């Protein structure tokens, strides 16, 4: 039976190893980020500029998309706009089939996860190897990424060493340098022999048709230069108007994502290699995916979610994510941003993720492009309740509103509730409040007049 977020959370909260891994990894990232932000007196201005740039891109999206298409095609590349996940998968497979590709190496791409690309390629008989170390680890484990920027965040080096010994057949200990070397030994023949490289894109620049890729391991550079074919696949919201617009975004992204002042490598790629040059792919295709994004742009309330630059900072600071990790959500995009995207892009309408949110507002404060996540999550909650129609909870709220208009009736109901809580707390908890008190202590009800005596006032 499929678990919901509550069932998964109960299991994950009992996993002491997971709790320790999350606490250490997220704590270190947040500490490094805080130190870098404190050193930068212009951080607030950077966030304002980035917010305004992202909003401009969303307003001008049709114009920017047309400009990107002209630039990519003008450089000899292929341009493809796909309305949904099925169309995007079919288009990528068509490109690979036409090139005779049977082996693919990938850079980290959340959109490829969103459209379930790997499974589609493998079903077609195309071998897929994740080039990012974290993505390789979760691929070997048969899992989804546990985090937007750190796919194997939930594992420690001992667990990874055991995985490499089992899955790669390499006798390796848990030293990080030797673990990286083991992954390199496994991946290098695939980078050299792959027919195609598939990557995402952190940004796509409209004025030049350039794909911008940010990384720390340089595996993406191998995937985009060694194979004869490069396919970049990303969401339509990643377009930016000008090359100059990259400056604030690239300053904010590494600090917010991993607590680094700058990423190890930033690649700005312009399509297939020109004749006479030896480096780069012979064939390049850019695949822009809608998959619900146009509808989200047309939504005046939820539209700011598409400002997101996929740094993962809201996950790092979220008290719920800090306890259950990414797999607790059971969705492609976990954490606060995932609450909104799960409904808008992936068609989830049950609102379960939204009601797991604590609404502490930490995600609002940390977001580098000022996505008002807590407000958007509240809106997702409201719509989920609206979708659910008449529920016991809504009937209870309506009954309370009616009763509150009659002081004598309200006082009688309050007295009855006080007695039920005092004398039959277990029945009251399970019958009337569902699972609310499973992980919370029920407050002791005060007696009549007790508040007045404690405060010395006539307030009630």
Image (spheres, rainbow, N blue to C red):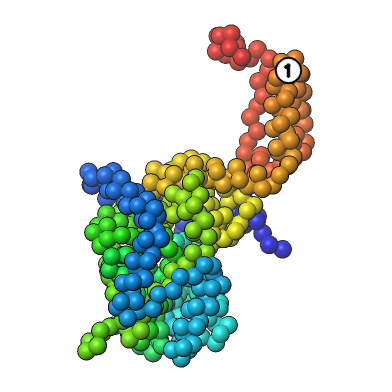
Q: Residue at x 68, y 17 (%)?
A: 447
Q: Quadrant of residue 422?
A: top right
Q: Nearer the viewer, residue 263 or 232?
A: 232
Residue 31 on image: x %, y %? 34, 50
Q: Is residue 382 above or below residue 190?
A: above
Q: Residue at x 57, y 47 (%)?
A: 380
Residue 217 in view = no
Q: Quadrant of residue 394?
A: top right
Residue marked by disc 1 = 406
Q: Residue at x 28, y 83 (%)?
A: 273
Q: Nearer the viewer, residue 58 or 29?
A: 58
Q: Residue at x 46, y 85 (%)?
A: 96
Residue 49 in view = yes
Q: Nearer the viewer, residue 136 or 65?
A: 65
Residue 128 on image: x %, y %? 48, 81
Q: Is residue 368 above or below residue 189?
A: above
Image quadrant containing the N terminus = bottom right
Q: Nearer the viewer, residue 458 or 445?
A: 458
Secondary structure beneath label 1: loop
Residue 361 on image: x %, y %? 46, 41
């Amino acid at each position: 039976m499929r678990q919901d977020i509550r069932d998964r959370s109960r299991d994950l909260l009992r996993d002491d190893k997971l709790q320790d891994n999350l606490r250490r990894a997220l704590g270190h990232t947040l500490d490094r980020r805080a130190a870098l932000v404190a050193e930068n007196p212009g951080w607030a201005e950077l966030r304002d500029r980035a917010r305004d740039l992202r909003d401009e891109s969303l307003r001008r999206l049709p114009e920017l998309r047309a400009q990107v298409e002209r630039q990519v095609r003008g450089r000899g590349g292929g341009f493809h706009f796909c309305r949904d996940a099925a169309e995007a998968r079919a288009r990528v497979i068509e490109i690979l089939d036409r090139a005779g590709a049977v082996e693919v190496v990938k850079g980290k791409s959340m959109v490829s996860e969103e459209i379930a690309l790997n499974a589609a390629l493998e079903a077609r008989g195309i071998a897929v190897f994740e080039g990012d170390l974290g993505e390789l680890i979760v691929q070997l484990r048969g899992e989804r990424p546990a985090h937007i920027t750190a796919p194997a965040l939930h594992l420690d080096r001992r667990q990874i060493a055991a995985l490499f010994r089992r899955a790669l057949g390499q006798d390796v200990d848990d030293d990080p340098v030797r673990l990286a070397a083991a992954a390199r030994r496994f991946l290098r023949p695939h980078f050299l022999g792959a027919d195609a490289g598939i990557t995402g894109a952190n940004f796509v620049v409209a004025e030049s048709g350039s794909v911008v890729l940010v990384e720390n391991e340089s595996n993406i550079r191998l995937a985009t230069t060694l194979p004869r074919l490069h396919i970049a696949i990303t969401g339509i919201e990643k377009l930016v108007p000008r090359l100059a617009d990259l400056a604030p975004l690239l300053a904010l992204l590494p600090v917010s994502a991993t607590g680094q002042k700058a990423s190890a490598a930033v690649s700005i790629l312009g399509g297939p290699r020109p004749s006479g040059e030896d480096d780069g792919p012979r064939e390049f295709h850019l695949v822009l995916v809608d998959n619900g994004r146009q509808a989200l742009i047309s939504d005046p309330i939820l539209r700011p979610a598409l400002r997101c630059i996929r740094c993962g900072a809201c996950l790092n600071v979220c008290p719920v994510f800090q306890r259950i990790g990414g797999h607790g959500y059971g969705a492609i995009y976990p954490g606060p941003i995932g609450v909104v995207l799960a409904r808008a892009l992936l068609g989830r309408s049950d609102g379960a993720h939204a009601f797991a949110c604590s609404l502490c507002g930490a995600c609002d404060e940390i977001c580098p492009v000022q996505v008002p996540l807590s407000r958007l999550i509240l809106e997702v909650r409201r719509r989920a309740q609206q979708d659910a129609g008449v529920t016991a909870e809504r009937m209870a709220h309506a009954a309370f509103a009616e009763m509150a208009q009659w002081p004598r009736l309200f006082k009688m109901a309050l007295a009855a509730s006080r007695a039920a809580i005092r004398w039959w707390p277990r029945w009251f908890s399970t019958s009337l409040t569902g699972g609310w008190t499973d992980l919370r202590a029920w407050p002791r009800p005060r007696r009549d007049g007790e508040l007045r005596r404690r405060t010395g006032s006539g307030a009630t």
